Amino acid sequence: MANASLRIDLDAIIANWRALDAASGPGTETGAVVKANSYGLGADRVARALMRAGARKFFVAVAEEGVALRQAIGEGPEIFVFSGHMAGDTDMIGDLGLIPMLNSLEQVTRHFEALPGAPFGVQLDTGMNRLGMEAGEWEAVAPIVLGAEPRLVMSHLACADAPEHPMNAAQLAEFRRMTDGIGVPRSLSATGGILLGPDYHFDVTRPGIGLYGGLPFEEAQPVVRLSLPVIQLRDVAQGETVGYSNTWEAEIDSQIATVAAGYADGIHRTLSGCATLWADGVPCPVVGRVSMDLITVDVTHLSDVPRSLDLICAEQGVDDLADVAQTIGYEILTGLGPRYARHYHGGGA
């Protein structure tokens, strides 16, 4: 089966990083979140491009991601691990110079006993109730932890994509209450927090989805183009059906293109019968159900059927597709499967 083509614009990622860096303002260092393999786009290539643009702090979800990233970018840049120092992580953290964001007293104890003197950071919970030390735990351990000079103290905003939500101000106030005067670099904002303004920026910002062309960064340059190869054309007579469970019936004699991709490639089954593919700017509706490896598309109105049809393109960005699938752009990007042939351009090398 022919591979679908996932084209990734590294120059656009760099431009988005630079725009968010400028928005972070003077005195604030802008890192980059490259967890989940840079949201499915390839952390090795993305991180190297961002290093050439000036990024020196990278954030991953788990130590295993940090290992792969260190092997890709070499020594020098800092790699922070959001999940902290989990059981079994000691050798990876110590051997590769990763910086775990310690989330609990248990992790503090593990890190200090297993890797005394090794770098670390701290994550605080300011109301999201997901990861990090709550106020009481932090107050009990802060004198010891701060004495060991953490590289970074951070928290994470729950509602930054909704600027007027009162949770933003509440978390900001709590973060300040927990950290003002500690003399350690602080970080509160990912992409949405950067857009909330200078009060939320502190010493380090951590853009993620905005680098990859997604909301809430509306000015982001598009990064991804996903083209699905046409592997067969079929004439379908009026009254005939297409796909599983006969969910689509031809009202007129039609021409149907079968393209090589499906829910095994992260194209949600909820897109069945409601998504659109594009042929050089001309919309072509998905008909029938999205199956594991194949999608059927009505191309009756095209004079010439192209070799491929676009699912993510200038006419339909990641968040447009997410709206149709009733999800978010993050899930669309991170679901892009390994069968896509990834093609990179730009990036300065």
Image: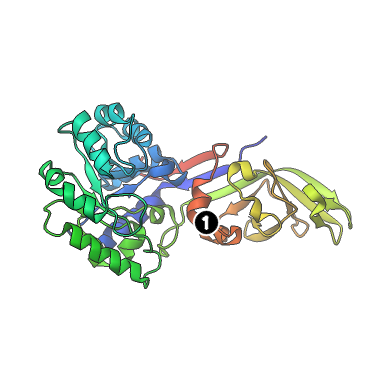
Circle 1 residues within 10 Å: few <14, some 14–19, many ≥20: many
Q: Is residue 28 above or below residue 72?
A: below
Q: In the rendered view, does 160 fall on the left or right side of 139?
A: right
Is residue 115 something that shows in the picture? no
Helix, strand or loop at disc 1? Answer: helix
Q: In this orientation, which residue lies closer to the viewer: 274 or 108?
A: 108
Where residue 238 appears, as percent x and y from the top left, is 89, 57
Residue that extends furthest to the bottom in the rendered view of this protein: 164
Is residue 307 something that shows in the picture? yes
Q: Quadrant of the C terminus?
A: top left
Kind of residue at badge 1:
Val
Q: Quadrant of the N terminus?
A: top right
Classify residue 85 by image quadrant.
Answer: top left
Where residue 51 appears, as percent x and y from the top left, is 29, 43
Residue at left offset 50%, top offset 40%: 343
Residue at left offset 55%, top offset 41%: 337
Where residue 143 appears, as percent x and y from the top left, is 12, 47
Q: Which residue is mark 1?
A: 318
Q: In the rendered view, does 64 fall on the left or right side of 239?
A: left
Q: In this orientation, which residue lies closer to the viewer: 316 or 32?
A: 32
Where residue 297 appears, as percent x and y from the top left, is 72, 53
Residue at left offset 41%, top offset 54%: 209
Q: In this orientation, which residue lies closer to the viewer: 136 or 289?
A: 136
